[in-house]
Amino acid sequence: MWRTSTSPASASAPRCTGHVACTPRLTWYKAHAKRGKAGMADAGVLPHFTGTTVTDAWSSYLGYGRAGALRNAHIPRDLDGVHHADPTGQQ
């Protein structure tokens, strides 16, 4: 199982994204100018990974066609967004 994430990063490029993939024992970092699939493909981990990825629901992760799991931290945030979109419908 890999946990994956992207975050803005400060590197030699003016705009850069840090791509991270990790297991409990290994961590892979890659800085890339692109945040989406181009950056993930260049990092070289997800295009070849066949296990379960733990991610947020960002569509770039979901497009790899692997088994996936959502990070627990994202579920309450998404539910909070539903509540804020229609607070009266939540009663």
Image (tube, rainbow, N blue to C red):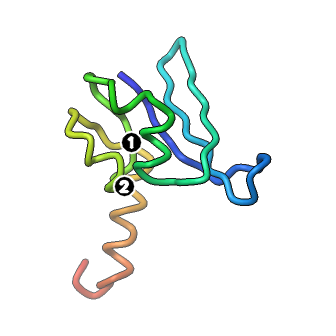
Name the residue: 29% across, 84% down.
86
Identity of the residue furthest to the bottom in this view = 88
Residue 41: give x, y in percent of width and height: 42, 39
Residue 32: give x, y in percent of width and height: 60, 45
Name the residue: 44% across, 31% down.
3
Comparing 6 with 90, the one in front is 6
Residue 45: give x, y in percent of width and height: 43, 27
Residue 61: give x, y in percent of width and height: 34, 46
Q: In this image, 80 relative to 68: left or right?
A: right
Marks 2 and 1, how far apart at CA? 8 Å
Image quadrant where residue 81 sits: bottom left
Image quadrant where residue 58 sits: bottom left
Q: Badge 1, how many Cα within 10 Å: few under 14, some, many 20+?
A: many
What kind of residue is marked 2?
A: Trp
- Mark 1 lies on residue: 55
> Is there CB contact under 8 Å for labels 2 and 1?
yes
Q: Badge 2, how many Cα within 10 Å: few under 14, some, many 20+?
A: few
Comparing 54 with 13, the one in front is 13
Q: In this image, 56 relative to 27: left or right?
A: left
Where is the C terminus found, in terms of image quarters? Answer: bottom left
Which of the numbered marks, if any, corresponds to residue 74? none
Q: In this image, 32 relative to 5: left or right?
A: right
What kind of residue is marked 1?
A: Thr
Which of the numbered marks, if any, corresponds to residue 58? 2
Where is the N terminus found, in terms of image quarters? Answer: top left
